[in-house]
Amino acid sequence: MSGPLRRPIRVVLADDEAVVRIGVAAVLAAAADVEVVAEAADGREAVDLALAHRPDVVVLDIRMPVLDGLDAAAELRRAGSPTAVLVLTTFGEDAHVTRALGEGASGFVLKTGDPQEIIAGVRAVAAGAAYLSPLITRRVLDGVPTTRRDGAARARVAALTDREREVLGLLGAGLSNAEIAARLHLVEGTVKVHVSAVLGGLGVRNRVQAAVLAHQAQLIPGPSG
């Protein structure tokens, strides 16, 4: 007897370019576990639709009329929306990525990247994990001189316990709380406590900011952990 069917991940998609929006919608439609429930052509419409539909994820382009994606993300955060934000970006928008980190975005994918990354990003942020396209991660890290970057990051993570650093490394690798729990043979509630301690200890607001620090401090484990 099969188990209960899981409902699909509900997504609101926002991009002012119709061709891009249609393309991303088609990519997401190919995933059996994802459902696009509404589409928006500007940031204001995206906020209104996200608050009305209460999706699991809102996919926001950065550059949109009326209200850009970053302002839309900030407005959703101020409204207390539980919806996770996945940002669509392009090369050359690194400063916007940095700002979006502060607005509570949970993930970043490239418009021109592998379409499967968009699906992976939606799944990751819906599960409560952070998602950074590998190319975006590299560009964010390359924006800071290596010596200063690594030294400052290592100094910040040094204040964490060994277990918290271990959790941070797995968080930086994009694992959800459930996946971290399985990897470390812990219960998920314990992982949540560790993640909260990591965010507080590092003085960051969300998992993506913590993930960037994990990369900077070179804490990301190999495939086998």
Image: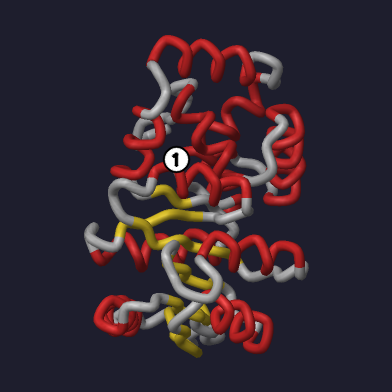
User: Going 76% across and 42% down the picture, which residue do you hit?
Assistant: 193
Left/right of residue 12 with respect to residue 134 in the rendered view: right
Picture layout, residue 141 above or below residue 150: below
Q: Is residue 1 above or below residue 143?
A: below
Residue 88: x %, y % from top left = 39, 62
Q: Amino acid at mark 1?
A: Ala
In the image, 69 versus 36, the foreground residue is: 69
Q: Is residue 221 above or below residue 75?
A: above
Residue 189 position within the rendered picture, expressed as x and y whole percent measured from the top left: 75, 50
Look at mark 1 in the image and give the residue it sits on.
173
Q: Residue at x 62, y 46 (%)?
A: 102
Q: Position of residue 65 (x, y in %)?
A: 47, 74
Residue 101 vs residue 211, the one in the foreground: 101
Q: Residue at x 70, y 37 (%)?
A: 199
Please say if 87 is above or below 8.
above
Indicate the quadrant where residue 126 lies. bottom right
